[in-house]
Each structure stands twice: as C-alpha cells, then as structure tokens.
Amino acid sequence: MTAITIDGNAVAAKIRNECRERVKRLVARGATPPGLAVILVGSDPASEVYVRNKIRACNDVGIRSLELRFPPDVSQQVVVEKIEDLNQDPSIHGILVQLPLPPSFDIAKILHTISVEKDVDGFHLYNVGGLVAGGTVFPPCTPYGVVKLLEHERIPIEGKNVVVVGASNIVGKPMALMLMQHEATVSICHAKTRDLAQFTILADILIVAAGRPRLILPEMVRTGAVVIDVGINRLKDGTLVGDVDYAGVAAKASYITPVPGGVGPMTVSMLLYNTIGSCERWQQQVTIPIPTSGISSLVAAN
Ligand code: NAD
C-alpha cells in the first residue's frame, strides 16, 4: 500500500481563499476589517519566524494586524495591561501571545487575561473547558487544522480508534478532546507511556505531536492507518522533519501528512479563520454567555 499524501498547503490555501471572501463581505457590509494583535516578548528566532508568517498571512487575506514587541526583560504587568487595553479596543477581534514566554512569566495569567471573545488561539480556560463540556468559542488552531484536514479528505472520525501521541496543553490534549467530540475512541500517549507501539498499532487514525524525529516507525503502524504528523523538528543539517519516519510509514498507511507542508500551514489558516469568525460575531453582536467571575476566581486560585 502507498499512502495518499494529504496536501496541507492546498487545503490551507483553500481555507485562506474562503477567509479572503469573508473579509470582503464584512467590509462590503461597512464593518471595520478584522484586526489581530500579535504580542511577541523577547526575540526567540523560531517565534520571530512564526510571528512573521502570521502577519504575512493576515495581510494576504485582508486582516489588519498589529504587532506588539516587548524586550525579554519587560515586566509581566506591562504585558497584562497591554492585553487589557486590547480587550477594550473595538478594532481588535483577536489577541495572540506568541509562546514561549520568558521563564519569569506566568503563562496561565497572561493567557487568561485575554478576553474569551478575542482568544483566537483558544488557550483561555473557558475555551479549553468548552472542549470538555461543549461551547468552545475558538477551537485551538493546530488541532482544529487537523480536524479540517480529515474532513477535507472525507476521512470518517466517528467510531474510529484514534491514538494521539503527545499530551501537551496546546496540541495533544485539545486534539484528543476534539476527536472525542467527534465520537472517536481516543487513547492519549505521552513520554511516560510504556511500550508506545502497543497503542499506536491499534490506531485507525494516528496523530503524532511529540517533537521527536523518527518516533513512529513502520512496524508501529497498522496497514491502512491514517497518519497525521504534527511534529516539527530541525535536524543538525538544517532539514525539517516530523515525528514519523515518512518514507517507511507512507508505504504502509492509507493517508499521511508530510512535514513540511502538512499540518503546519493549516495552523496559520485556522488562526485567520478564528479571527474572522470573531469579527463576524462582533458585527452580529452575538454575545457569549461567559461566567467571568467564576473564571477569574479559578485563575486566582492558580
Ligand atoms: P511539548 O513538548 O509541549 O509536548 C510534547 C508531548 O509529547 C508531551 O506530552 C510529551 O510527554 C510527549 N512525548 C515526548 N516524547 C515522547 C515519546 N518518546 N513518546 C511519547 N510521547 C512523547 O510539544 P508541543 O508543543 O505539543 O509540540 C509537539 C510537536 O508539535 C513539536 O514538534 C512542535 O514543534 C510541533 N507543533 C507543530 C505545530 C504545527 O503547526 N504543525 C504546532 C504546534 C506544535
């Protein structure tokens, strides 16, 4: 069997075209164009690249972007106050804080300062909780991109055995919860999982987000499985690879995503998608019934 390669660039471009049309429709109705604020603290080289790509993608579809840069020694309070200002700014519909933040920062405090209505990365407690209880306003971009890829390829999720390798708050856990919402049977593996292969071999759909090159070898994959590689690893020679032995696994799987050109481009497209959704909601004056006091006390307790 030779797997069909899922072309993430093509699917992401399709979503961007859709985004461009939605922005045109908003502006034609007299709305201000969607606005995304991107906050970058410090000068981590990878973060610089991600931010540049996000700003470029915004320009590409007509989203107004506002880039806010802070030196690595800025106080957390200054960033919190900036986010609070942006929460009140009617021209801004999405606020994104590029991670990682310097070690002195309390990431949870920063992320929970972002208003739920503008949390286009989907990392606020309300949005995370919504993945369990229903009612998420913004699904987190990378897992959302994976679901869109599966839907685009018409790969059924309901009732399938899905194994997610990686249990981080930004990829693995939300990914697993989103697939449970689609009524898959989901197993989550992580660095402490004993004998990873005994889980991965059972997967109809295997999603890998561990950040370990060649973690998944052909003998760990069921013939005909769908394999989605979220990992991005830079090897010493500069090559970019995922977590899956692509050539070996492609000979056994039914579908596979390449790295680069698989999940990566989808993440940015879903950020645009969420930001435009936020602007549309704002224009239609759809309010979100958010128990803000409850959330504040939860955050305070942490
Ligand atoms: P993370 O380091 O926060 O989490 C990694 C997870 O993988 C942890 O749960 C860890 O327990 C698990 N893990 C590590 N080694 C393992 C092993 N040997 N066996 C099983 N599980 C193992 O990373 P993250 O932020 O979730 O990102 C994961 C990967 O996805 C990275 O390569 C990252 O660059 C990539 N990523 C890609 C995109 C994209 O748009 N394509 C977006 C976010 C992250």
Image (cartoon, rainbow, N blue to C red):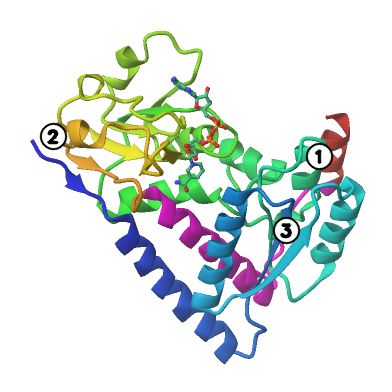
Q: Which residue does the numbered mark 2 point to in the structure image?
A: 251
Q: Is residue 280 magenta?
A: yes
Q: Residue 10: x, y in percent?
A: 30, 63
Q: Amino acid at mark 3?
A: Ile
38 left or right, relative to 76:
left
Residue nearest the viewer, comparing 156 with 275: 275
Identify the amino acid type marked 1: Phe
- The answer to whether 157 appears left or right of 285 in the picture is left
Instruction: State which tag comes first along the sequence, 3 or 2.
Output: 3
Between 253 and 45, the residue placed more toward the observer is 45
Question: In terms of secondary structure, where does tag 2 sit?
Answer: loop
Q: Nearer the viewer, residue 249 or 161?
A: 249
Asked whether mark 1 and ligand 1 are closer than 8 Å, the reply comes as no
According to the image, label 3 marks what residue?
Answer: 39
Q: Quadrant of the N terminus?
A: top left
Q: Residue at x 18, y 37 (%)?
A: 250
Picture disc at residue 124: none
Name the residue type under label 2.
Ala
The span picked out in magenta is 263-292
User: Marks 1 and 2: in contact by CB < 8 Å?
Assistant: no
Residue to which mark 1 is pinned? 105
Q: Which residue shows up at 83% across the image and 29% down it? A: 302
Residue found 63% across the figure and 72% down from its top = 279
Q: Most extreme residue toward the top, as rendered?
A: 194
Quadrant hosting residue 81: bottom right
